[in-house]
Amino acid sequence: MTKLPVPLRTGLLMVLVLCLGACASLYQDMDPPKVSVDSFRSLPSNDGAPRFEIKLRVINPNTEPLDIVGVSYSIELLDRELIAGVTNEVPLIEGYSEEVVTLEAGLQLFELLRFLAALGQTASTSGPLEYKFSAKIDFRGLVPTQRVEDSGEISLN
């Protein structure tokens, strides 16, 4: 095995350091978007399966716009994932701005049956129930996937 001359080794080392620095600068530091449930309503059903419209308020706390490729989301009640959906129709959200994003989701019928059974066993069914909204947001480019959650209470009355 032959040794490389010192100037060549130094040159290769400098190129390697520059490449690593360039790659690190491409991966920008980004705060996750703030997502909250703005509204939730039932939609008229064409095929008998319940559908829901969920409006999310998405706040971009960064200077760069959020170019979202797709969102996968779910809503849980009593720790049961009752509603789930995906979308790839999300508008570009400019830096330091907010948008209302409308999603459509379907009800998971088997989970609904489990939920109703659990609701019947819960002592306080007249009060509000805690919900948890979870989403995985994928971006175009080198921005890493973000996972966001929002929780609150919903009344069944």
Image (cartoon, rainbow, N blue to C red):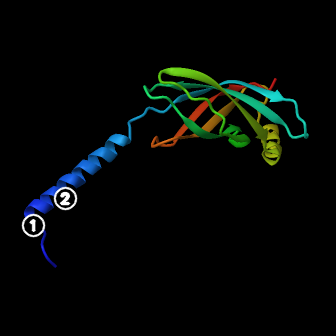
The quadrant of the picture occupied by the C terminus is: top right
Above or below residue 71? Residue 65 is: above
Q: Residue at x 71, y 41 (%)?
A: 85
Q: Residue at x 79, y 44 (%)?
A: 108
| Residue 155 x/y as whole percent | 75, 24
Distance in Å between CA atoms under marks 2 and 1: 11 Å
Amino acid type of the residue tagged 2 in the rendering? Leu
Q: Residue at x 43, y 25 (%)?
A: 63
Q: Residue at x 69, y 38 (%)?
A: 76
The quadrant of the picture occupied by the N terminus is: bottom left
Residue 12 - label: 2
Q: Is there a contact, CB below 8 Å, between mark 2 and mark 1?
A: no
| Residue 90 x/y as whole percent | 63, 32
Amino acid type of the residue tagged 1 in the rendering? Pro
Q: Quadrant of residue 133?
A: top right
Q: Residues within 10 Å of mark 1 (few under 14, many from 20)?
A: few
Labels 2 and 1: the sequence-earlier one: 1
Above or below residue 98? Residue 11 is: below
Q: Kindly state the secondary structure of the residue where label 1 is placed.
A: loop
Residue 5 - label: 1
